[in-house]
Amino acid sequence: MHVPDVCFVQHPSPKLQSGAYGRRSQLESLLLARPIYPIDAYIMAEVAPAAASTQADPAIASTTEDIQDMSIEESTPSGPLTVFHSPEAFNVKHPLMNHWSLWFTKPPTPGQKDAWAHNLKEVISFDSVEEFWGVWNNIPKPSELAVKSDYHLFKAGVRPEWEDQQNKIGGKWAYQFKDKRAVPIDELWLHSMLAAIGETVEKDDDKEIMGVVLNCRKGFYRISLWTRTCQNKATLVDIGKKFKQVLGLSEKDILEFNSHADSAHSGTSRARSLLTV
């Protein structure tokens, strides 16, 4: 399908930490500019609050194709033309530093066995600024999700599970927002995703961030940042402090870190804290 040139408008954003290199700085600027696509909104059946139907997969596939069609990419003999070949061009692909996948967990049905494994679905993958905004603009926002729904944004190839080989020795920073009516959860989740894919909460050689998770529960929202390991205290504390800024928390608010091993042992995501900031 033909799509005209993408235009960008500035999007309100938190004060994220800038990276040390030009490419990371460019990505941060681009991620904070929202592209406007000349299309109607799509609703992904798998992530809609009422999506309990087992016939959702065709809808996901259709929507995925539409969103992927929106990736504006011009090819050259040496491969895709990117902004790093032509920094002033906005009709080319602006690649992220990693490939990412959005996952969704729909609420379990009463009496359902193996609810987690059955209800966790990979919705779409992307690796460019344009594709990210195409996804964000066309999925239900956190405030529209049903109770017991979850969003997971992880590096491609990593399942959002404690048991995944790339997560098993890691942990997470997490904060629980208890006053749901007073929390701008859509904005906070957007900022969390931008921090992850823009790679602004860790140093270039840390390679700790695996993904971010949003849990929608009856009495609270919880946002978590998952890390690859849980041993390097100084690095983890630095990441935690930056993530605390992303979430807009005050000095008196406590952000907690615990290991996946402790969470699995206790049978809950609220295991004892190894670190706090």
Image: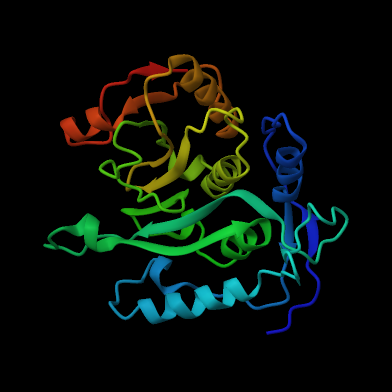
Tally of numbered tags: 0
Residue 216, image x, y percentages: 37, 49
The residue lying furthest to the right in this view is: 88
The residue lying furthest to the top in this view is: 234
The residue lying furthest to the bottom in this view is: 1
Q: Where 89 sits versus 181, above or below? A: below
Residue 106, image x, y percentages: 32, 61
Q: Which of 97 and 118 is in front in this view?
A: 97
Give me the residue at 41% from left, 53% from top: 157
Give me the residue at 38% from left, 25% from top: 257
Residue 81, image x, y percentages: 76, 63
Q: Nearer the viewer, residue 30 or 277?
A: 30
Q: In this view, does 93 lie to the left or right of 55?
A: right
Q: How is the image coloured?
A: rainbow
Q: Where 141 sits versus 68, above or below? A: above
Give me the residue at 63% from left, 43% from top: 198
Residue 55 image-quadrant placement: bottom left
Q: Is residue 147 left or right of residue 67?
A: left
Residue 249 image-quadrant placement: top right
Q: Where 56 sits versus 120, above or below? A: below
Q: Is residue 110 left or right of residue 224?
A: left
Is residue 261 at least partly visible in the picture? yes
Is residue 41 at least partly visible in the picture? no
Residue 179, image x, y percentages: 43, 38
Give me the residue at 55% from left, 75% from top: 42
